[in-house]
Image (spheres, grey):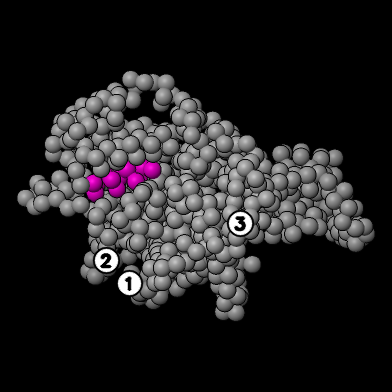
Amino acid sequence: MNNHELSASEKGLKIFFYTVLSIVSIVCALPFILIISGSLSDSVQILQKGYSILPRGFSLDGYRSIFLFPMQIAKAYGVSIFVTGAGTGIGLTVMTFCGYAISRSELRYRNVIAFMIYFTTLFSGGLVPWYIVVTKLGLKNSIWALIIPAICSSFYILLIRNFMKTIPDALVESARLEGAGEFRTLLQIVVPMSKPILATIALFLALAYWNDWYLASLYISKADLWPLQYRLYNILNAASKIASVGAENFTSKILPTETQKLANAIVATGPIIFLYPFLQKYFVQGISIGAVKG
Amino acid sequence: MRKDGEMKMIAQNQLIKQKKGGVFNELFRHRTLYLMTLPALCFFLIFSYIPMMGVYYAFVDYDFGKGILHSPFVGLKNFQYFISGGWDAPIVYLTKNTILYNLVFIILGNVMQCMFAIMITTVVGRLFKRVTQSVMLLPHFVSYVIVGTIAYNIFNSNYGVLNSLLKALGGSGISVYMIEWIWPFIITFFFLWKGTGFGMVVYLAAITGFDREVYEAAKIDGCNLFKEIRYITLPMLKPTFIMLVLFSLGGIMRGQFELFYNLIQRNGQLFYVTDVLDTYIYRAMTVNFNLGTSTAAGVYQSVFGFILVVTVNRIIRKTSPENALF
């Protein structure tokens, strides 16, 4: 493409594309910059003049206040890490087993099972019956309420099945001729060959668990079991309640100040930002695979 | 490599085996494989199929203590609040909001994703491509709680960025959270902000998969960049576009709960233009503790949504069978 002479109008179009993409990139990044500078601002100046794109004054008070009670944030981190780890691990295992089984053509009822799984995306009982089932299982205020209700996704199971279907039958059969059982065939032959799709789904799951606040809002009332995002949600909510009463009257230490809110937002997103360059690469690869084979 | 004959024999043997024996025989022969599906099937039984039977809750005056069977049957009483009020009834504006928002999200979302994917593939410069793509994907990785924080940070009337900017320019502040008409735009903006970079990847993958020779040939024939996009890239992207749009149409009665809930929260003044079925149902249950209305609205959402999916699918089957969902 590069050795081709561009006409003036083509050059114009390219310049236009560069400009649009640059503007869009700035729009995408700007909110993050706002939060970061807000969290580093001086809260007194924020109350007087409001937020701006560059920090107003400079103070680490927002962050300092979080680590005044390190146990709170440590607990929330613990919950989030456990939920993300256990949820991703168990979910991936359960879905890989199921996806593998229904990818095998010798299974006579594979399509019946696949349809039973697919049907759940077409019709659902709604929020209340689902809530009652989870409650009746005794999951209320248990850490498993943050994990189990989201452990399987029909979409991912079908994605795994579609990918595994493309693995040549001969490979699976040769393993079986050598006396390998289903579990060994799956673990030693099929799983290594399905690494790209499994890695992608693990990433999707981990991200969903890490960012989840919804399950906690339904099932967890004990603050000890709040994951990071729900803790953040409550901090923000407390803050907006104060704002409606009149923020000027509340500069006390108990209620979160504006900068503390934003510092909390940064701390809750933390690991994702650090892992982003690494995650993003696999993410893009994974979606591409899903798009081609899915 | 095994011989053809051997393969055929194995295949035939399997066919004979399959014809023999009933359900139990099949289940027993492949017991390990069926066992592997069991955890997932249990999950869907408990968290999807049992709640489906819970549709019945919508027709009783549910009592947590007595259980479903001993709660009195009340017919359509639970639907009363949801459907009364003429043209201002919750059912009317909720259906309207849900469908309109989702339609805009689906169409505008896919158009944007296509557009930016084409732009990124057209520009040269690896670093520029990589940086723009990374930055556009970044919003996908943060939670909706953060999205709510961002919106609040920009728009709140006490010290939001928007108001401090307006004041710095000598204007007076505005209370964005009091202005109804502006919210559909803000919500759509944040939807696009969060999802475009992610959705774009699919289109990028599609474009990368296109045959380069077509482009080379077109170039030799004197095709310029405009024509290349108009007559090669866009037509070749059309099937992907149609497939993705149709795929999303099925879920038009559901979705984006977290976006709406975190942007609007419990700001009742805005509900008429920003409430969708998902948020209404959630609030009815968790904030107002009105299980009856919540279940009734949920049943309406499920049944109407199901009818929509089946209808859409039937239309697709007639017009472009290869895209049918089931």
**Magenta-colored span:** B145-156
Q: Is residue A55 left or right of residue A176?
A: left
Task: From the image, state whether disc 2 or disc 3 is nearer to you.
Answer: 3
Q: At label 2, which amino acid type do we have?
A: Leu
List x then y, in percent, for residue A272. 42, 37
Identify the residue under disc 2: A13
Which residue extends farthest bottom? B318
> Could one spot residue A195 in this view of the protein?
no
List x then y, in percent, for residue B70. 67, 50
List x then y, in percent, for residue B276. 42, 59
Asked if the residue under mark 1 is in contact with the one under mark 2, i.e. CB atoms within 8 Å, the reply is yes
User: Residue B226 bears which disc, if any?
Assistant: 1
Main SS category, magenta section: helix
The answer to which of A209 and A178 lies nearer the viewer is A209
Is residue B209 found inside the magenta-colored segment of the image? no
| Element at label 3 | loop
List x then y, in percent, for residue B245. 48, 67
Q: At label 3, which amino acid type do we have?
A: Val
Question: Disc 3 and disc 1: Cα gap in Å?
Answer: 62 Å
Question: Disc 2 and disc 1: Cα gap in Å?
Answer: 8 Å
Identify the residue under disc 3: B60
The answer to which of B187 and B127 lies nearer the viewer is B187
Label 1 chain ID: B
Q: Residue at x 44, y 54 (%)?
A: B279
Question: Disc 2 and disc 3: Cα gap in Å?
Answer: 63 Å
Task: From the image, state whether disc 3 or disc 1 is nearer to you.
Answer: 3
The answer to which of A140 and B317 lies nearer the viewer is A140
The image quadrant that residue A37 belongs to is: top left
Q: At label 1, which amino acid type do we have?
A: Phe
Q: Residue at x 81, y 58 (%)?
A: A108
